[in-house]
Image: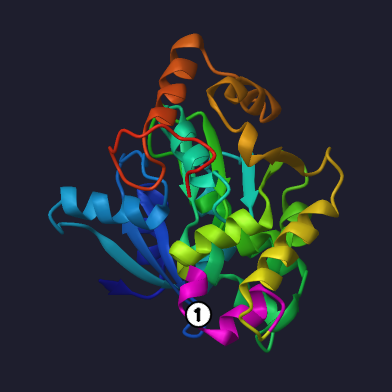
Amino acid sequence: MRNGTDQAVLSELIANTGFLPVSVDPVKRTIAWLDFGRYHFYEGFFHRSADVFSALKKGDIKTLLTGIDTLEEDALVAESIYPTGFIFHAGRSGSTMLSKVLARSRENHVISEAGPTNSIWPLFAENGHLPIQETENNKKMYRNLLLVMSRQRSKTHKHYFIKFTSFNILFFDFIHAVFPDVPAIFLNRDSEDILKSFGKKLPGWLATGDTGFLNITAQSAHTDKKEIVESFLTTAKKYPVDVLKSIDYKDLNPDLLPSILHYFKADASAKQLLLMQTQFLFDSKVEFNRKSFDENDT
């Protein structure tokens, strides 16, 4: 692994659009990059895509380590695809399924709950506490982070979707200020159903027990799951439908997909639509497990 942000490293990053950020260290102020080449992300989570890619390459992967200042380099995003749509949720609300449905088409580049889009937030908070500082430099760095993750690696990619980890809804004002023209949806679900699913297995960001992280994400030092989930749902309800469109978890099915794509202005051909709809036949969490998606899924 090469370390630094000198001109040679920057030139390598600019020249090779296969490099995407895989982690951001807000303390050391560094970014780790991995060369994904032309690999298409079918998986429902970004870290799984990285794991599958690494396994396929048998560990023979190219990495770089740079300073956070590379996000100020507009040249890195010169060939990026502008976001087509944002997917928000409160957890266990069908977002993973929708991500995998969209990713089933190689026309759609889908970044799903990527570590860098989560760990970037402490850099924008004063002394690690909310509120996020909406400075022009912070907004530029965030804009370039999302854009650098959609660098044009495949000629088939036409659209770019981002599925955020649930707590990112708390930062919607900041995200919308940076990307005011990107259509956004919020997958809604009854809080008791979400908590029931959490009872089976906690989401990774909540299972860590890191109260410092919860303080910046959930706006509270406590770890009460119900209050955290309710804060997500309450926040989403603040926004008008033309800014954040709510979709009920119970309505998420193959027949609704054309409407979702139309809302995102990403209408698909009949062939691509059918291809995406077939993903509903498979489990949303376990790869290649044939199990129809329904409202009992978690």
Whether the magenta-drawn stretch holds residue 215 is answered as yes
Pick the quarter of the image with the N terminus: bottom left
Farthest residue in the left direction? 58
Farthest residue in the bottom direction? 127
Residue placed most toward the observer, 108 or 231: 231
Residue drawn at x 58%, y 20% as measured from the top left = 255
- Residue 35 seen anywhere in this rendered image of the structure: no
Q: Is residue 262 above or below residue 219?
A: above
Left or right of residue 53: residue 241: right
Q: Is residue 234 above or below residue 138?
A: above
Q: Name the residue under label 1.
A: 29
Whether the magenta-drawn stretch holds residue 126 is answered as no
Left or right of residue 202: residue 185: right
Q: Position of residue 274 (x, y in %)?
A: 45, 16
Range covered by the magenta-colored residues: 205-220
Residue placed most toward the observer, 269 or 72: 269
Q: In this view, does 190 lie above or below 259?
A: below
Mark 1 surroundings within 10 Å by alpha-carbon count, few (fewer than 14), some (14 through 19), many (20 or more): few
Residue drawn at x 44%, y 63% as measured from the top left = 200
Q: Position of residue 210 (x, y in %)?
A: 52, 84
Secondary structure mostly taken by the magenta-highlighted segment of the chain? helix
Q: Where is residue 153 in the image (x, y as percent from the top left)?
A: 39, 39
